[in-house]
Image (cartoon, grey):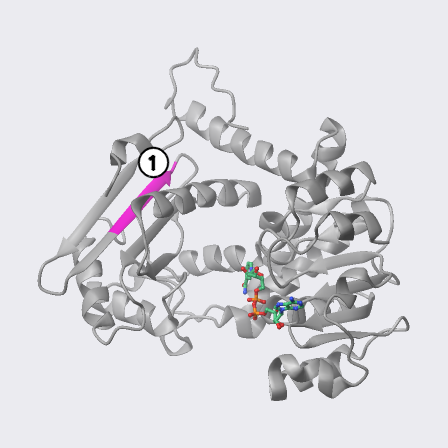
Amino acid sequence: MTEDVLSLVDEWGPEKVVCVSDRRSGMRGVLVLDNTARGMGKGGTRMSPTLTVREVARLARTMTWKWAAVDLFHGGAKAGILGDPRAADKEAVLRAFARALRNEVPAEYAFGLDMGLTEDDAAVLLDELGDRGAAVGLPRALGGLPYDELGVTGFGVAEAADAAAAESGWQLAGSRVAVQGFGAVGEAAARRFVELGATVVAVSTAAGAVHDPDGLDVARLSRLRADVGDDCVREYGGVQPADTALTAPTDVLVPAAREDVVDDAVALATTARLVVEGANLPTTSSARKILAKRGIPVVPDFIANAGGIVAAAHSMDMRRSPFRVDPDDVFPMISTKLRANASAVLAEAKRTEDTPHAAAHRLAQQRVLAAMRLRRQLPPDTTLEPLP
Ligand SMILES: NC(=O)c1ccc[n+]([C@@H]2O[C@H](COP(=O)([O-])OP(=O)(O)OC[C@H]3O[C@@H](n4cnc5c(N)ncnc54)[C@H](O)[C@@H]3O)[C@@H](O)[C@H]2O)c1
């Protein structure tokens, strides 16, 4: 470690950093509880050969804002193991990590999935502590829900878009949607857009794009994806360059593949009246400014793609329940939360003449600050300005 862990602490947190190691397995890891003013710390557990305490602390802070932005009562936390997730001794390392954190888990933290960890790993972590409350993200046979298979995030993206269109004074039903990326997020979003009465005019994968101004047959594309993956666009027929999904005439643009794809050129050229960020960080900061100047609202990633974290919060709640988590309970929850959040953030952005990203961050920080004040965690006369 090249820096003092205490230098990570600022007025928000972290409240607790627990570094653990085990000589027998060689396990080294860390748990960071960032800010729990609004509730118990929650965030995934990752395993990576380049993991650092700073990285985990930064991710824990991001979780503090995400939970508050979505208005769910969890605090920010994250855990990480330094190591190769493909190593043969992974199970021994996971077990040592769980044992080393038995004072904190499940009282203050529950393991969850992030980079390098699978549902089977969550089962091992739970087994080691012998407590159903120790982990979420479990396999179906242990009561977990396969979120990507169900498409919870994509479903939420379309719900957020519907509310954002209404907030902007027009209807999603009957309008055109272009979706970049037809993976777990993009495919489920496209399906929900169709259910909500929109016309999906363009879809792309890394293998290319398909475009039809009269509307694509999304159900057929989904079936093809199940068979041939990214090549579904080739099988569909009339494949075009992948960028077509970003440039095709549309009312709603949904980047749901990767970061930084909505750049200045796309922001200047798009006909979209609304951009909904399905992927993480798909819009560059300079493109966001261009879109703001053009009066095109952008529903920020951590608002639009929060379906997964709403589902994770529900799983947290259900950890000790003998009943299975029911998808029919989860979808309405995602719909209600994401619609309310998308509307609130766009309304706040309009009120403060700010970008929706800035408005969402401010809302989140104000919520955390209010909780800290009410718990008397700040001296009464403190006027802590939310960080920019
Ligand atoms: N899965 C989730 O629940 C979830 C939740 C929040 C955020 N995200 C974010 O959403 C994004 C997509 O995640 P996912 O789980 O759907 O991934 P995925 O791997 O299932 O799908 C990615 C899709 O993007 C396509 N793609 C890649 N490069 C492309 C390009 N240049 N042009 C067009 N298409 C391209 C791929 O072919 C694939 O169809 C990522 O940024 C991810 O971090 C995912």
Q: Residue furthest left?
A: 24
Q: Which residue is depicted at the point 22% across and 60% down? A: 98
Query: Compared with residue 299, is residue 150 higher up or lower down, i.e. above or below?
Result: below
Q: Position of residue 202 (x, y in %)?
A: 79, 69
Q: Quadrant of residue 7?
A: top left
Q: Position of residue 96 (x, y in %)?
A: 17, 62
Q: Which residue is depicted at the point 66% across and 58% down? A: 157
| Number of marks present in the image shown | 1
Q: Which residue is depicted at the point 27% across and 38% down? A: 16
- Is residue 344 in view from this perspective? no
Name the chief secondary structure element in magenta.
strand
The answer to whether 208 appears left or right of 197 in the picture is left
- Is residue 53 in view from this perspective? yes
Residue for badge 1? 14
What is the span of residues highlighted in magenta in the rendered image?
30-36
Q: Residues within 10 Å of mark 1 (few under 14, many from 20)?
A: many
Quadrant of ligand 1: it is bottom right
Label 1 SS:
loop
| Residue in the foreground of this view, choosing between 73 and 32 | 32
Q: Residue furthest top?
A: 381
Q: Position of residue 322 (x, y in %)?
A: 37, 69
Looking at the rendering, in which quadrant would you find the N terminus?
top left
The answer to whether 114 appears left or right of 282 in the picture is left
| Residue 97 lies in the magenta-colored region | no
Q: Position of residue 364 (x, y in %)?
A: 55, 36
| Residue in the foreground of this view, choosing between 270 and 295 | 270
In the rendered structure, which amino acid carries the disc numbered 1? Answer: Pro
| Residue in the foreground of this view, choosing between 13 and 28 | 28
Query: Compared with residue 214, is residue 369 higher up or lower down, i.e. above or below?
Result: above
Looking at the rendering, in which quadrant would you find the C terminus?
top right
